[in-house]
Amino acid sequence: MTTPTRTARTDEPASALLGTLAAQGASGALSTEAGIVYLAAGHVVHVESALTPDIGALLTHSGALAPDGWWEAIDQAGRRCRVGRQLVDSGHLAAGALELCHLGALFDAAYFVLAHDGPVLRFRPGVSHWLGAVRAVPVNTVLRESRRRRELLHRIWPEPIIDLAPLARVPGTDPADLPTRRSRTLAQVDGVRTAAQIATALACRTFHTLVELRRLAAAGLVAPKAPAPAPVPAPAPASVSAPVSAEPGPA
């Protein structure tokens, strides 16, 4: 087995480098502009992205876990990268509930990391995530699921800006008779929140929220908020020249 080395920024797409690292059985953290993929023995063990709620937010906002229990596990086991194990061993969370939430968070974040398959920023061998081992997923499974989600969302509404921009309701539209989940999603659209922030507010997985938001966009009820017009610069004050004396100077 080839020992992977630390890499700096490269033009190689994240999906291609993930395939190489999987073949090498690599362990470490692969960073892109949208997030970080954590590998152990060539399998994906966690993915995080600022564009999706993290697993702690999903567990605590949904009521599956009290915030005190979450922060206690972070404090006791974070440095040892065993937060997941601590949650289960302490009785705060059932193993099945942790695994289900972990997989949801992993695939949600992987969608954003791989959505545009941008270049890799760096790979750090041997770096582990503080959550620790929950369930490892083959790289090919992560790539296939990310592609499936991207194609599904495109069929619903082909504009990916919906996933990233602050969203606003379209004026003059009538949102009557919406399904419950879609109505709850629309109620969170306020011209400020992004899809990830709406998912956090609903304690819902991001992909499910994206599906509803793209359906709302397809129905003409939601659109990216238009950027505020640039302020018009104030006119520069007219320069004042020193008065020129009409009197002749001293001889």
Image: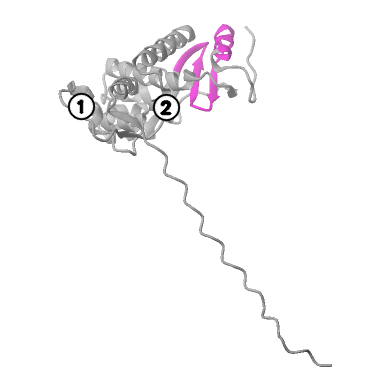
Question: What residue is at 66 percent from the left and 74 percent from the top?
Answer: 241
- Mark 1 in CB contact with mark 2 (< 8 angstroms): no
How far separated are the C-alphas under marks 1 and 2? 21 Å
**41 inside magenta stretch:** yes
Question: What residue is at 43 percent from the left and 13 percent from the top?
Answer: 146
Above or below, 80 relative to 229 = above
**Residue 72: x and y, percent?**
33, 34
Camera-side residue: 116 or 104? 116
**Residue 132 in sight in this render:** no
Please give the residue where the numbered disc 1 appears in the rendered image: 183
Residue stretch rendered in magenta on the structure:
16-45
**Residue 240: x and y, percent?**
62, 73
| Residue furthest out toward the bottom | 251
Question: What residue is at 63 percent from the left and 25 percent from the top?
Answer: 9
Query: What is the total number of numbered labels drawn onto the structure image?
Result: 2
**Residue 141: x and y, percent?**
44, 7
Above or below, 239 relative to 56 = below
Quadrant of the rendered structure where residue 62 is? top left
Q: Which mark is residue 161?
A: 2
Residue type highlighted by circle 1: Ser
Camera-side residue: 4 or 76? 4
Camera-side residue: 215 or 100? 215
